Amino acid sequence: MPTLHWIGKEKVINHHLDVPFKVLDHQYGFDNGTQVSAETGSGNKIIHGDNLEALKALLPEYEGRIKCIYIDPPYNTGEESWVYNDNVNHSQLKKWLHSVVGKEGEDFSRHDKWLSMMYPRLKLLYKLLSDDGIVFISIDDNEVSSLKLICDEIFGTSNFITNFIWEKRTNRENRKEISYRHDYVISYRKNKLSKNATIKPLKMTSDALSRYKNPDNDHRGAWKSDPATAQSGHGTGDQFYDLIAPNGNVHHLPSGRCWVYTNPVMQDAITDNRIWFGKDGNGVPRIKTYLNLKERGLVPETIWFSADVGTNEIAKNQLKDIFNGLAVFQTPKPPNLIERIIQISTDPDSIILDSFAGSGTTAHAVLNLNKQDGGNRKFILVEMEDYAETITAERVRRVINGYADKEGTGGSFDYYELGQPLFDENGDLNEAVAIEKIRNYIFYSETKTPLKPAENKDNIYFLNLFNDTAYYFYYEPEGLTSLNHEFLSTIRTKAGQYVIYADNCLLTKDFLTKRNTIFKKIPRDITRF
C-alpha cells in the first residue's frame, strides 16, 4: 500500500498516546430555552478547547460509541490562516508550535504542518468511532490526495467508501484562473465486516413518492410502472418471445431488447395482476413496482447537487437570519449537507461527533432531524476558537428556541471547558482535580459506563456495583491509603468480586484470591487512555 511521508511524521504517529488526559469542566446547561447550572443529562455536548485534547477527554465515555463523525478541518488553501499548536516534544515540531500557517510563499512547510496536525486527531477519531461507524471529512483539492493516503493508513484501504462531490456554489468566480464549484466529502468505515457499517438509502422525496399510484385498486397498494424489457445483450434465449396480452394483443420486442422475465414467469405475473397494460389494456406491458407499507429508499449518488443539499452562500444567509443580519462566519456548511450525511450513516438514536465544529452546523442538523422524525440523536461538538460560546453555542441556543420565522426545534445541551489534566507531569493523580471527576474516570475505565449514585449503603470509597463486581477507590489526596483488614471490615456490599484501588496493599495474594478481591495500585494500575 502506498504511504505518505512528510517532515515530522515519525514524531506524530503515536503522539495521540502522549496527549494529556484533561477533565471536562461543566460550565452550564441549556434546557429547552433555559440556562441552568446543573448538567441536563441530554447527552448533547459543546466543548471549548483544543480538539486533540478534547478527543482524548472523550475516550473514557465514548470510545467505540460514535456512529457518525463529520469534520470540516482547515483546507490548507494558502489563503486561510490556522495555528499549529500541538505540543509535540521534538525540536523540528517545536519550531512550528503556535505558528500561524499561511501562504505557500511565506510558509513552505504548511503541508507538513497540516498532516502533522491531522494525523493524531484522526487516530483518536478512529478510536472513538463505533465498529459500524462511518467518518466523513470535508476537503478540497489542496489536501484531498494527502488526506486519502493518511486515511488509508489509519482506517485501511478496504474501508474506503467513496469521495463524494458537493456542489458548494452555483455562481461563477471570475477572479481566479479556474472557478471552483465543488468540494469533496471523503468517507471511510471503521470496519467493513460489521453488518451495520453500510451507507443507508435516502428517504424518497415527495416528488418520487407522487409517482406511486393505484389506478386499478390493487390490493397490494400503490405502485409505479417500470419497463418490462431490458437490453438484449444480457438476456438468455428464453427471454426472447412474442408476448400475448390478456386481450389477445401480441407485443413484439423492440430491437435490441429482451423481456425481463421468461415467458412462464411473465404469464404468472400477468395472472397475478403484476403486469400493467394501461387502463384500456392495449398499452405496452410494464412491471408494477410496489411502494408497500414503507417507503422505498434511494441509493445515494457520489455527486450532491446544491439544489438538494445547499451551498456555502445559502448557509451564510441562513446564519445571517439566525444572528439578526450579522455575517458571523464566512464559509459555513449548510445544515442540509450534514443532514444528508447523518441520514445515510446513522440510526435515530446515534451519537454524532464534530471536532471542528465552527458555527455549529452539525448540531443544527441533528436538532432538525430529531424534530422531523422524533429521533433521539445526540451531538458532540468541539471548537477551539474563542467563538465557541458566542457563535457555536449561541447558534444552537437560537435553533432550539427558534429564530426569524423558524419554529424552534427544542432540545438541550451542556457546555464544557477543558479543565486540568488528570495526571501530573510525574504520572501521579493531579490533586487539583475534583475527587468526583477522578472517581468518574476510574469507574468508566473499569466498566465503560457512567458512575451513578450508589443504592447500597457502604463506605465513602465505594463507587458502585457492576456485573456483580463491587468497585472501591480508596484515595486520600493528602495521605497514603492501605488495603488492609481494617478497610475490608468497612465493606458492606455483597458481590461476587471486589476491585479495590489503594496506594498500598498489606494483604497476601492468597488471602485476596480467597476473598475474590483484586488490588489495584494508585496510580500505577489506573488505565491511561
Image (tube, rainbow, N blue to C red):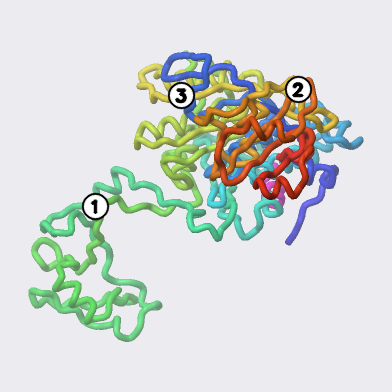
Q: Which residue is mark 3?
A: 412
The mark that comes first in sequence, 2 or 3, is: 3
The mark that comes first in sequence, 2 or 1, is: 1
Q: Which residue is mark 1?
A: 293
Question: Which x, y percent locates residue 404?
Answer: 39, 17
Inter-mark Cα distance, 1 to 3: 34 Å
Decide whether residue 167 is among the magenta residues. Answer: no
Q: Quadrant of the C terminus?
A: top right
Residue 402 numbered mark, or none:
none
The mark that comes first in sequence, 1 or 3, is: 1
| Residue sitting farthest toward the right | 91
Which marked residue is nearer to the observer: mark 1 or mark 3? 3
Check if mark 2's residue and mark 1's residue have beta carbons within 8 Å.
no
Residue drawn at (83%, 38%) of the image = 109
Q: Is residue 210 above or below residue 386?
A: below
Query: In the rendered structure, which segment of residues is drawn in magenta?
Result: 142-150
Inter-mark Cα distance, 2 to 1: 62 Å
Residue 477 numbered mark, or none:
2
Is 130 placed left or right of 278 in the picture?
right
